[in-house]
């Protein structure tokens, strides 16, 4: 099926977007050229009424995202423009980065549950990494008696997760299981979060890049997704269906170089979601003007899963 919408896009208002061409004006023009009937911009936002924003999210403020957008939404016949947001859900603390009353100011919401690259914010570091940091802090303190234990601890904590992980000789944690369990648990916790329940009744809401673990290489990504059992997926998707929560299919979560997606783990995941009667929204998750063209991958992806017009969420139907 030709997909005629894209509602997961980041413009220059998201501080992770570096393409000077990624302006609202350019996005709207290209969306029309691509034949979209529905197009949305969904910058990263954390509601400042919710305590606990990470340093990065503190800069992604509601009025900044919203007012910039409202001023430049054009009126072009045949295409509906929407302003949404990709907010955040931190599974480790059960914190939703958006209040329902604030979400009401937007046309739709995307809530991710798998920003697993955001360690100690979305997901806790695993015990092996924690132990390695402690070991490092102790050895720094031992070898540098002029440094306080607190400084040594901070030095050890400032090293990236990836670098610490590379120093671990033998893993005691089953990394695949640990991360696949997290994806399942965070999805279920999100569905049961009190504020989320209010939010989905306020504005059309999709779970952004459902069951795509962010921050892993291709091989690990596939293993982690494969480790989520059908039984668990059915439990999650039936709940989402009953709550009227939509499932996002994010073309950025599929292997970029692939010419076909049949072997991708996410095809299995979304076939199960379709079997459960879920409704879908599509998005490229682009951070550049050129990336909007990736929506054409969604044509083949939707075909492989078996998605038809009726399986789309009402707000993205043309
Ligand atoms: Zn995301
Ligand atoms: Zn995104």
Image (tube, grey):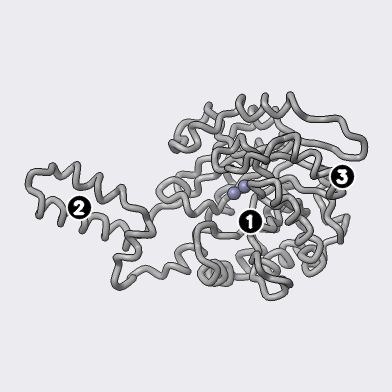
Depth check: 288 or 135 in front? 288
Tell me residue 269's x, y (percent): 67, 66
Q: Quadrant of the N terminus?
A: bottom right
- Above or below, 29 relative to 71: below
- Disc 3 secondary structure class: loop
Res. 26 image quadrant: top right
Tell me residue 159's x, y (percent): 31, 52
Disc 3 versus disc 1: distance between alpha carbons? 24 Å
- Disc 2 secondary structure class: helix
Tell me residue 276's x, y (percent): 75, 62
In this rendering, would 79 be left or right of 123? right
Q: Earlier in the sequence, mark 2 or mark 3?
A: 3
Q: Residue at x 20, y 58 (%)?
A: 135
Q: Earlier in the sequence, mark 2 or mark 1?
A: 2
To which residue does mark 1 refer?
210
Query: Of circles 3 and 1, which is in front?
Result: 3
Task: Give the crowd class for mark 2: few <14, some 14-19, many >=20 residues within 10 Å.
Answer: many
Res. 235 image quadrant: bottom right
- Above or below, 271 relative to 53: below
Q: Earlier in the sequence, mark 3 or mark 1?
A: 3
Q: Which mark is residue 137?
A: 2
Task: Give the crowd class for mark 1: few <14, some 14-19, many >=20 residues within 10 Å.
Answer: many
Q: Is residue 197 visible?
A: no
- Disc 1 secondary structure class: loop
Q: Residue at x 37, y 68 (%)?
A: 173
Disc 2 versus disc 3: distance between alpha carbons? 55 Å
In this rendering, would 226 be left or right of 53? right
Query: Of circles 2 and 1, which is in front?
Result: 2
To which residue does mark 3 refer?
37
Q: Mark 2 near mark 3, Cβ–Cβ under 8 Å?
A: no
Q: Residue at x 58, y 47 (%)?
A: 190
């Amino acid at each position: 099926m030709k997909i005629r919408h894209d509602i997961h896009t980041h413009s220059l208002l998201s501080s992770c977007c570096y393409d000077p061409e990624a302006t609202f004006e350019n996005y709207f023009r290209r969306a029309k050229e691509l034949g979209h009937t529905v197009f949305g911009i969904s910058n990263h936002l954390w509601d400042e009424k919710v305590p606990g924003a990470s340093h990065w999210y503190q800069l992604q403020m509601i009025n900044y995202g919203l007012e910039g957008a409202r001023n430049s939404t054009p009126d072009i016949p045949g295409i509906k423009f929407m302003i949404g947001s990709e907010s955040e859900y931190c599974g480790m603390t059960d914190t939703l980065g958006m209040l329902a009353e604030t979400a009401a100011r937007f046309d739709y919401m995307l809530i991710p549950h798998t920003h697993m690259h955001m360690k100690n914010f979305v997901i806790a570091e695993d015990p092996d990494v924690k132990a390695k940091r402690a070991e490092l802090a102790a050895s720094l303190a031992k070898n540098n008696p002029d440094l306080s234990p607190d400084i040594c601890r901070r030095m050890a904590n400032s090293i990236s997760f990836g670098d610490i992980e590379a120093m671990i000789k033998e893993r005691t944690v089953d990394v695949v299981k640990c991360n696949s369990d997290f994806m399942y648990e965070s999805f279920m916790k999100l569905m049961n979060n009190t504020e989320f329940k209010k939010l989905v009744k306020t504005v059309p809401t999709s779970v952004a890049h459902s069951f795509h673990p962010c921050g892993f290489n291709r091989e690990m990504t596939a293993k982690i997704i494969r480790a989520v059992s059908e039984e668990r997926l059915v439990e999650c998707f039936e709940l989402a269906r009953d709550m009227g929560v939509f499932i996002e299919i994010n073309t950025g979560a599929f292997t970029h170089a692939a010419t076909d997606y049949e072997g991708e783990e996410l095809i299995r995941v979304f076939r199960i979601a379709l079997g459960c009667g879920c409704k879908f929204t599509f998005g490229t998750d682009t951070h550049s003007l050129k990336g909007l063209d990736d929506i054409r991958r969604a044509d083949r992806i939707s075909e492989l899963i078996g998605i038809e017009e009726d399986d789309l969420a009402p707000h993205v139907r043309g």
